[in-house]
Image: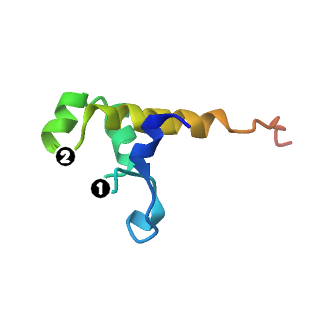
């Protein structure tokens, strides 16, 4: 397992068990959403100074691992 993924933690009592960054109440989902909406790492760090640069890479690596494991099924058009 890649060392960066150790930054991703889970706690069923925090945010319903969603993946978190280093046990902070900051979810991987939120980081990905902010990046997808165009926020820069610098902007996010200003709002969340407890984050570190490797946290962004960890969130992206986690998302990559989730997508890489997807199974693709042929879709049949409704008729």
Q: Where's residue 51, x and y in %?
A: 24, 42
Q: Quadrant of residue 49?
A: top left
Q: Where's residue 7, x and y in %?
A: 39, 44
- The reply to whether callout 2 and callout 1 are in contact (CB within 8 Å) is yes
Residue 34 visible, this angle: yes
Q: Where's residue 41, x and y in %?
A: 25, 30
Residue at point 51%, 34% (across, down) = 2
Residue at point 44%, 33% (across, down) = 60
Figure check: 40 above or below 7: above
Residue at point 41%, 71% (across, down) = 13
Q: Quadrant of the C terminus?
A: top right
Q: Quadrant of the N terminus?
A: top right
Nearer the observer, 11 or 64: 11
Q: Which mark is residue 7?
A: none
Q: Quadrant of residue 42?
A: top left
User: Which residue is denoted by mark 1 in the rendering?
Assistant: 24
| Residue closest to the far bottom | 13
Residue 29 visible, this angle: no
User: Which residue is denoted by mark 2 in the rendering?
Assistant: 50
Residue at point 46%, 36% (across, down) = 3
């Amino acid at each position: 397992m890649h060392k960066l993924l150790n930054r991703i933690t889970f706690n069923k009592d925090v945010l319903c068990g969603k993946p978190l960054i280093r046990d902070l109440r900051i979810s991987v989902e939120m980081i990905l959403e902010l990046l997808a909406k165009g926020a820069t790492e610098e902007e996010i760090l200003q709002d969340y100074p407890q984050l570190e640069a490797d946290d962004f890479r960890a969130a992206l690596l986690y998302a990559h691992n989730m997508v890489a494991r997807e199974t693709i099924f042929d879709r049949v058009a409704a008729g």
